[in-house]
Image (tube, coloured by chain):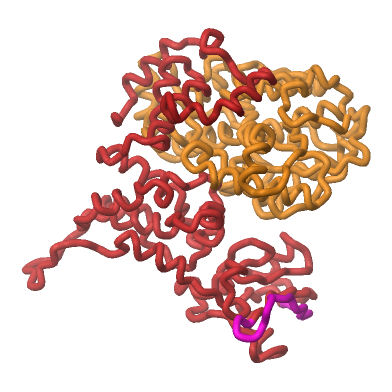
Chain colours: A orange, B red
Amino acid sequence: MSKLKYALYTGCTAKESTPELLKSTMAVARALDIELIILEEASCCGAGHLQDFDEFLSLTLNTRNICYAEKLGLTMVTICNTCQLNTSLTKEKLDNDESLKSKVNQKLSEVGLEYKGTSDVKHFLYAIIDDIGVDAIAEKVTKPLKNLNIAPFYGCHNIRPSSLHKNNNGGENPYVPNSMERLISALGGNSVNYAHKNKCCGFHVELQAPKTANKLSGDAMLDAMDNDADVVVTPCPLCHLRLDVQQHNISKEIGRDVNMPVLHLPQMIGLALGITPDALGLDHNVSEVTFL
Amino acid sequence: MREHTKRKVIFKVFRFNQETDHLPYYLKYEMEVAQDEVILDILNRIKWEFDGSFSYRRSCRHGICGSCAIKVNQKPVLSCTENVFNLIDMYGNELVLEPQDEKRAVKDMVINKKNFWQKYSKVKPFLVAEINNHPKHENIISQEEVDLLDESDYCIQCGNCFYACPSVKVNDEYLGPAALLKAFRFNADIRDNAKNERLDIVNEPGAGVWDCVKCYECAEACPKDLSPISKIGKLHNQIFQNNKAINNVATRHAVGFKSSIKKHGILDEGELVRYSEGSIGVLKHLPEAYTMWKKGKIVMPWNMPKSKNMDEIKKLVEISSTVDF
């Protein structure tokens, strides 16, 4: 089998507030023999907020990002659920609307680019599950996550809307997602079944409605805690910024102490593959990773 | 090929009578289900074969009246269109039937939908127009003008999106997806004259579009595939396009993305928070900023990374912008 190669759209947080996500993604890719070419040309996906302000501008910018993956002839891989959502929404709109596509391409032609629609857009979680497979990943495990209760937190934008994602997330059912459970069991851990695993963390209203955001994150963390989780794991850095970084504010809002390590998906995989905590950037996690 | 085999299912059913019960409870009903049966058939069979006091709303049986909406294993469904075999394939042979919102149960599957209708009535959910009582000719609406509604007139007010919305669950003031979709429906109607008033209503901080958490639960819950969240997005756009945006943390947060992208390509996270909150408001974030800084999660302005080929990004921002703030 030829070496797997993807164009990596890092998103903004992996270069700023969650450096451990980029570090652990690169380390896991090396261990799984995947080549990731970082799209350094890419700009922010707009996170749904630029879309609220100026939909057409956000479409042009996101299309430009995809163009760079197309230039390399590679599938674009994302490591942020919201990047995944906004990039695939852009792709879906352009691929189904010739006149919109030509409008956007007319703008892109002024900077020497053209969108063709030749590159798929996939989140890293589904790229490795689809293209490597959980069994092959299980074979590479050297330090199984034994006796560890791991609560998967999916994050909205990888699973909803399901009609958008179905071709790129293995048809994950948003009401009963199971890809992370399959991965956790391949890594030797126990997955925690809890009602909030597919719910919202509130990130997108964090500034204008902090109460809402803290209540939603709190509901998720308490549910994981009350179901005996030792650690939460998420494929989304925005969820991570809430569930890990905001535990103090969450506790204040909901009146119960929340104190639990939260891992990025590649950090969890990396630990099972025997990669050192340092190489996974665990020192950047705010809530101490105590189970090591 | 039609499957003739029946499947055995245990239905675990939420039971509650506001007048006599202190707390709700669940009863199990075991039955053989045929391939063509929908959840409404099961509700009928529980009532007819097991317990005549079992209560639920139903009317049209054709997915158009919106009365029979409930939850099966937390998935919002219209009972009359939801095939039981499909649900068994998803969840296995035990299916949990619950009302849309357990806390609002009156009797079994019947809930008090007052909060839904109250929110709904706040957005002027009707056409506001001067009507000529004695028209001399038809008022022709072109297909393009109908398309502007983006099917939002297909909403059947079942409430599935509203009761699935996490923002509604934690914020009593939030209008929620159904009411906002309805606001969009009449704002997209070329005959309507109350667009500005509706924009003022949906622009209200704490209640309007700015409290949507962007989780897409409403898009998933809608039995008519209307994607209420995409209509909420369009209301956001209308607010900016019609100069209705109030200068506040939510609007600056949306606009801040553009200036940041123009400057760095990627988002300057620290600057976005400062710009959105204002120089005084940002101070309340100092404790978490300090925690993040200690953990190497804050990039200082002088180290802010930039995307490659910034000239392209700047040019695209210049030539593709369609709205000002």
- Is residue A162 visible to the viewer in this orientation of the structure? yes
Depth check, front residue: A92 or B182: B182
Q: Position of residue A162 (x, y in %)?
A: 59, 48
Q: Which residue is drawn at 60% across and 19% down?
A: B298
Residue B18 falls within the magenta-colored stretch: yes
Of residue B304 and residue B49, the one placed in the foreground of this image is B304
Left/right placement of residue B273 relative to residue A165 reads left
**In the displayed structure, would residue A172 be above or below residue B320?**
below
Residue B43 found in image quarter: bottom right
**Quarter placement of the N terminus of chain B:** bottom right
User: Which residue of the protein is positioned furthest toward the top in this rendering?
Assistant: B302
Which of B238 and B286 lies nearest the eye of the viewer? B286
Residue A118 lies in the magenta-colored region: no
**Up/down of A116 relative to B37, above or below:** above
Task: Identify which residue is drawn at 45% across, 74% down.
Answer: B65
x, y percentage for residue B33? Answer: 73, 77
> In the rendered image, which quarter is residue A183 located in?
top right
Q: Quadrant of residue B107?
A: bottom right
- Read off the magenta span: B17-33
Question: Would residue A67 be visible to someone looking at this image?
Answer: no
In the rendered image, residue B266, in percent from the top left (x then y), is placed at 51, 20
- Examine the rendered structure and indicate whether residue A275 appears above or below residue B42: above
